[in-house]
Image (cartoon, rainbow, N blue to C red):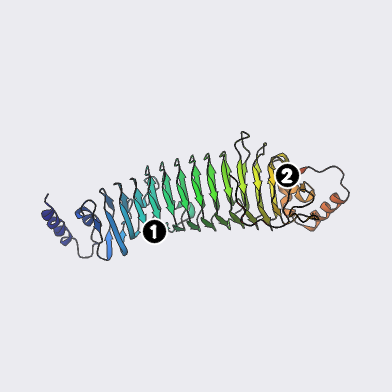
Amino acid sequence: MHHGKLFGFLLLLLLLQPALALPPLQLYVEITPEGGTLKPPPGEYSGPVVIRKRITLDGGGKVTVNGGGSGSILTIEADGVVVRGLHLSHSGDSHDQVDAGILIKANDTVVQDNIIDDSLFGIHLSNAHGNQVIGNQISSKDRDVTLRGDGIRLWYSHENLIKDNRIKNSRDIVISNSRENRIIGNQMRHSRISMELVFSPENEIRGNVFEDNYNGVTVIYSDDLVIADNRMLDMRKITGFGISVKESYQIKITDNEIAHCAIGLLATSPLEAENILTIENNLFTFNDVATYFYGERGGHKLHYNRFIDNFVDVMGSTTATSRLNHWENNYWDNYQGFDQNHDGIGDQPHRVFLYADRIWMDRSMARFYRGSPALSLIDFVQRLVPSSEPDLMYTDPTPLMQPPLNRPVKD
């Protein structure tokens, strides 16, 4: 159909809309030429909207798209599309269909500075590569956290940049079967799992803030990750953790702040000697348990970390698990040695034994008495006159006398 006739036809459809109905944004998209820019007049429009050609849709912060409570509000199916400055609200309710504010099924798109609310899922990338998702504000529907959708979800999507997004009152960030993505400078609060990576190697998670969620970053079967410069704060549920790593190897966990968590770092033992975690330059503070290692082998590298004001710095499923890790040059606020040669390193190793004050680690029923005067008294007597040699939990042969500051991480 000729463009003039098409425009007239669409204009007639708009005029025939009921007086109180919202104008459909899809009509404006259809009359925008390939490679063109659509700047709708300020106001509210109805969705859903599907973009099947390369255009720029710019709401200028003054355009709202109402999804009408059915399906995804905006779907991008063409490469090179730019969508920015929109307010998208009221998606469908289907978890099976993954009803989202924005569904991206294309490559090399830019989705920037949009506000998404009352949307089950926020932004869903499905088999979408090389996209940029930047500076969006996302929240889910007002319901129990387990019934919300994910704020951002990547499914078989590679080499995307997820940057500076603000997510709250959502469920999770999910990276599934997706590699070589960069998740940089995002914030997520009042949600469930801050980020979950499943079968997703070679991703970079850097400079994010995850606060007051149930759990922090969960890594499952995902190798060769960089988890750096993040802040994991206030994961205070009984099983809450800052970072959890299961069956995933060659991961660098560096320069993170992990504070006020039930467990700071939870990691399984490597199956092979080369499959270790590098844990360096992190701050563990005010956690119930700063680090917990599960398994039999040990072998992870822990260097230049700061352990300050944690109830327990290190736990393991067995004493061998923590003892066989490589501890060097960490700062321990409970180190009781001296530095007579003033080289910044304690003259004696930092050794931690399994005395009575740690019996609750092996006997869960004793957890109730943790920190009690009675258990403290038993511990004092055992240290004063030990009936047998206690088990050694771990040793740092070169404990630092002062916390390390901005020490470079070795490759």
Q: CA distance from mark 2 to mark 1?
A: 46 Å
| Residue farthest toward the top in the current orientation of the protein | 272
* Residue placed most toward the observer, 260 or 91: 260
Residue 194 position, x and y percent, is 51, 52
User: Which residue is disc 2 drawn over?
Assistant: 362
- The answer to whether the residue labelled 2 contacts the one labelled 1, judged by CB atoms less than 8 Å apart, is no
Q: What residue is rendered at 64% in x and 41% in y?
A: 300
Type of amino acid at the residue the image marks with label 2: Asp
144 versus 106 height, above or below: below
Quarter of the image with the C terminus is top right
Answer few, some or many: residues within 10 Å of disc 1's Cα (few below 14, many 20 plus, some between 14 and 19): many
- Residue 335, given in percent of the width and then of the height, sits at 76, 54
Q: Which residue corresponds to the image point at 16% horizontal and 62% vertical from the top-left?
A: 15
Measuring from the top left, give residue 188's x and y in whole percent.
49, 57
The residue labelled by disc 1 is 118
Looking at the image, is mark 2 or mark 1 earlier in the sequence?
A: 1
